[in-house]
Every structure is written in C-alpha cells, then in structure tokens.
C-alpha cells in the first residue's frame, strides 16, 4: 500500500465503476506540475502510486515534481512498468528462468504456484518465420509449416508457459509483429488493476528496441535487455535518471505525396544532428492534430534510430478514436479519456504548453518524399536526389572482380524487394500506397525482374484484410508480392536464401547487389 505522503489518493468514476487513482495535482500547491511534459507526468504518477513500497521515497517524488528542465540528469528514480512485452527470441530465456525456478521449488518440496510473474507479461511470436517460399499463392502456408518444423520444441514450451503462469500470455506465430499487435490489441492506454481497483497509465518495458512504437498511443515504454525485462516481470523497478525532455513542436500538415515514413526520416536526421541520447522526446503543438495515430506510431517506432529513450505523443481525441476503431471495449475507452482529462494528461488546443529542456520546430508542410541512406537511417536522401546519390555511393561497395559481359545482373541491382517491418506495415497509408503502385504498374504491363526475391510480410492480419477489401492484394500478387508470413522476416535478416542461380551469379561475378525494404 502506498504511503501517500502528499494526499494524492483519490477516486475516479468512469466506465461504470469507481477506481482508485493518485492525483498529480495533489502536488500543485508546492510545484508547477501543470506544465510538466506529458511523459514526466506519467513518471510522477508512477512514483506517487509506489511510494513507500521499498524503492520510492517522498524525496524522489519531490525531485521529479520540481523538475529543473535545464539541469543535467543526476537524480535516480525507480520506475515500475505496468507490464512487460517480449518477442520470441529475447523473451524465451525469461520463461526458461521461470521454469527453472519452478523446478527448484519442486526439489525443495515447495508450491510451484509461488513462482509467478508479479507484472503481466505478454510475448508475441514474430521473430522465427523465414522467407523460404515467395512469389506463390501458397508461400504463406509453406513458410508457416517450415517455421513450425524448425521451432516446434520452443513453441510447445511457450504454450506450456502460458498454461502454467497466470500472468503470462502468448500471441501465437503467424499472427503479426509484436509492436503492431501491441498497438492494435494489447495496449490499454490506461491500465486497470482489477485486484486493487486502481487505474493508472499503461506503461511498459519491452525486449525489443522498437517497443517505442506504442509511444504513438500515449503509452510510455521503451526497449530494455532481457535481464532487465525479467527483473521487471518479477516486480523489480527499473532504475533510471530523471531525464531531459526535448519538445518537438509540430506545425502545419504533411503535403500530398509525403508519408509518415518521409516524416520520420526527416525527424531522425534532425534529432541525430541535435543529439538526444538518453533523453525523452515529446511531440506537441497544433500539428499533432493533423497526424493520424498510425503516423504517430511510425514516428515513435524510430526512437532508437534517433537515439532517444522514447518519442511520445500525448493522449488526445485521435487516441480515443483509434482505441474505438480497433475494437477496445467502450468502458475501457471511457476510462482512458476520463483519466487523461482528470490527470491533466489530455492534449487539445486549450492545453497548457509544457516546459521542456529544449525545443525543436518542424513544419510538416516542408516534408518531402525521402529514402534512408545506404548505411544509416539518419542519412536521409530526398527522392529527387536518389539516382545521383546512389551512383555516387555504389563504387565504394564494388569488388575488384570484373563481371562477365553476358551477365544480366549488374552491380547495384536489387535482388530482394520486401514489403515488411513494423515501421512501414503498421501504417495503412503506406501500405495502400504500395498497393496502388502495384495496381498502376500492372496496368502498364510492368513486371519484376526475374532475379528479384519479392515478399509481403505485414505486421498483422488487419493489413491483409484491408488490402483484400480494397482489391489491391491481387495487384501485389501479380507482381510477386504474395503473402509470405506475419512477422519480421527480411527486416531482421530472415529473408531466406536467394534462388541458387541468382546467388551463384552474384558470387562468381563479384557483384555488389542490394535489397530494398
């Protein structure tokens, strides 16, 4: 039970029930909590709720409530996430450790039920599918079958874990990419603890760097190592310094032809130049209302590429629209909005502008179509400069072998073209654009070169649904972009081998080839 030194404990009536909350404005007589950044308000509530439970003191709360925006981080606090998110590569060791602890308890004659995650843990299987088959109507089924053949023992173990532990659940393979599943299904916005009758911000740590995608929904979270995630799962708070917060003001709206991917590459370029390692990045300003939730998620997803700990948007009307659109229960959506308004975490045109450590302004109307540079995502290349920049870069990659004159594949040829990644496939506007491009190409009789390995691996089955309903999957199939699986695939190196004749030609002629995602 919280010590509640500041009298923050209160109640909120929403969603047809009365819930206990810890009010941030209980500190307003002593500190200017109204102008704290949204992200720090989330941390402040976390400390208020966990005061007196061994890791949080009244002094910690006062240090955060009286945050000095200009100061360098020096005060350490204990952050207790509401849940832990894992994927199958980095998450399995945590479940193995829990199983080992249960074995030890059995040997000691104890009750295995004593070994249980203290914080809800969710694991999404998305890192194991590989693109063995492509360009065929049954590629998805073939790849899924091979995935189960390779990983059967691991999957049986994870199914056991879900049955053995009350607070551990698994999203099965061939369902989606962890971050998109989190966005569309797992995230709560506001977490409701039914046992304690409490409501508090949904927060998390995840065993994947792109956990920050959920920041687009106003959920604070970031990626950590497997040991840290396991410790959090067992109730150990995450030790951190109170961070500096860079405010990024957004104005205007994206012009026609520019996508969230273009925007996030622009943001990455600017923030890498500014230097935001170890900082929180928070977006504010009138331009927020012009960005749909999917675009915000794209920006949050790339926080590791900026170097920031998180890249978060506040809760607003668009957040609520998205929660309803994705089928969250009405009472849950009502709680999210009521809680955000009650705690001063709601953003609209009348919201007080937060105080930040530094600020940066971006006019969305100036964003242009771009691609990521050949080495680093911050090396943004405007699409208009792509050909010249590509030709300038290519010689630095070429080998000394002179290709035979009759080889169809040239240096710089694309041999893998993959529509995948949690960054891109979570955004309907980007995926619809890909489908429309396929439709136009097909109408003009264009075809993919025979040496290109094509694939489509969406972040969730929702993507397949709207591509089918829009009549665009047929066009993608015609160009060889058949569904190969629901998972990370090529983005994490699971592209599978090139066809042997293509691979042999590349090896024998010392060709420098590339992939496009």
Image: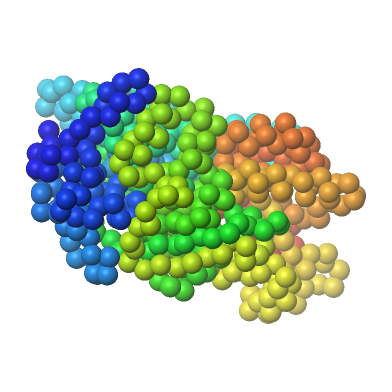
Q: Is residue 422 placed above or below 509 in the rendered structure?
A: above
Please state if 7 lies on the left or on the right of 204 as rendered: left
Q: Quadrant of residue 112?
A: top left
Please state if 9 lies on the left or on the right of 507 as rendered: left
Q: Is residue 74 placed above or below 187 in the rendered structure?
A: below
In the foreground, 324 or 397: 324
Instruction: Tell me the residue at 67%/34% (across/down).
Output: 466
Q: Quadrant of residue 355?
A: bottom left
Please state if 13 lies on the left or on the right of 177 as rendered: left
Quadrant in which the C terminus is drawn: bottom right
Q: Does the rendering let one see residue 165?
A: no
Check the image and name the residue furthest to the top.
16
Q: Quadrant of residue 147?
A: top right
Q: Position of residue 381 (x, y in %)?
A: 63, 70
Q: Position of residue 498 (x, y in %)?
A: 68, 53
In the foreground, 82 or 2: 2
Instruction: Tell me the residue at 30%/26% (across/down).
Output: 13
Q: Position of residue 5 (x, y in %)?
A: 9, 43
In the foreground, 141 or 54: 54
Q: Is residue 461 placed above or below 16 in the rendered structure?
A: below
Please state if 420 lies on the left or on the right of 337 as rendered: right
């Amino acid at each position: 039970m919280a010590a509640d030194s500041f009298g923050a404990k209160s109640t909120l009536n929403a969603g047809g029930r009365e819930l206990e909350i810890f009010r941030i404005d209980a500190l307003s007589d002593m500190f200017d909590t109204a102008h704290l950044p949204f992200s720090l308000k989330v941390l402040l509530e976390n400390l208020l709720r966990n005061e007196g439970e061994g890791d949080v003191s009244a002094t910690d709360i006062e240090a955060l409530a009286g945050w000095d925006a200009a100061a360098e981080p020096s005060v350490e606090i204990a952050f207790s996430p509401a849940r832990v998110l894992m994927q199958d590569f980095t998450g399995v060791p945590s479940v193995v450790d829990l199983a080992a602890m249960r074995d030890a308890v059995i040997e000691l004659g104890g009750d295995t039920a004593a070994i249980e995650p203290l914080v809800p843990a969710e694991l999404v299987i998305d890192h194991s599918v590989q693109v063995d088959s492509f360009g065929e109507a049954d590629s998805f089924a073939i790849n899924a079958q091979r995935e189960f053949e390779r990983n059967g023992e691991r999957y049986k173990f994870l199914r056991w874990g879900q049955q053995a532990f009350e607070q551990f659940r698994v999203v099965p393979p061939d369902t989606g990419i962890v971050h998109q599943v989190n966005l569309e299904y797992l995230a709560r916005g506001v977490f409701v603890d039914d046992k304690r009758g409490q409501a508090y911000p949904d927060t998390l740590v995840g065993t994947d760097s792109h956990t920050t995608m959920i920041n687009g929904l106003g959920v604070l979270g970031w990626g950590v190592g497997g040991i840290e995630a396991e410790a959090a799962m067992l109730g150990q708070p995450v030790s951190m310094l109170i961070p500096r917060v860079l405010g990024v003001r957004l104005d205007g709206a994206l012009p026609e032809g520019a996508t969230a991917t273009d925007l996030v590459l622009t943001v990455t370029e600017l923030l890498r130049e500014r230097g935001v390692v170890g900082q929180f990045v928070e977006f504010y300003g009138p331009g927020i209302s012009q960005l749909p939730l999917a675009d915000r998620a794209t920006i949050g997803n790339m926080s590791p590429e900026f170097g920031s700990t998180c890249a978060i948007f506040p809760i607003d009307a668009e957040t609520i629209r998205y929660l309803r659109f994705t089928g969250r229960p009405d009472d849950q959506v009502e709680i999210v909005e009521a809680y955000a308004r009650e705690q001063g975490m709601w953003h609209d045109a009348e919201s007080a502008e937060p105080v930040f450590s530094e600020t940066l302004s971006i006019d969305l109307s100036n964003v242009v179509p771009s691609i990521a540079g050949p080495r680093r995502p911050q090396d943004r290349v405007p699409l208009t400069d792509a050909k010249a920049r590509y030709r300038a870069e290519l010689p630095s990659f070429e080998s000394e072998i002179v290709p035979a004159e009759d080889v169809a594949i040239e240096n710089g040829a694309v041999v893998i073209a993959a529509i995948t990644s949690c960054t891109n496939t979570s955004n309907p506007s980007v995926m619809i654009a890909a489908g429309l491009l396929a439709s136009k190409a097909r109408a003009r009789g264009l075809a993919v070169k025979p040496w290109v390995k094509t694939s489509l691996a969406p972040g969730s089955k929702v993507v397949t649904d709207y591509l089918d309903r829009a009549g665009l999957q047929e066009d993608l199939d015609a160009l060889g972009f058949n569904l190969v699986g629901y998972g990370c695939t090529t983005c994490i190196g699971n592209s599978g081998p090139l066809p042997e004749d293509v691979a042999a030609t590349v090896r024998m002629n010392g060709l420098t080839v590339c992939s496009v995602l």
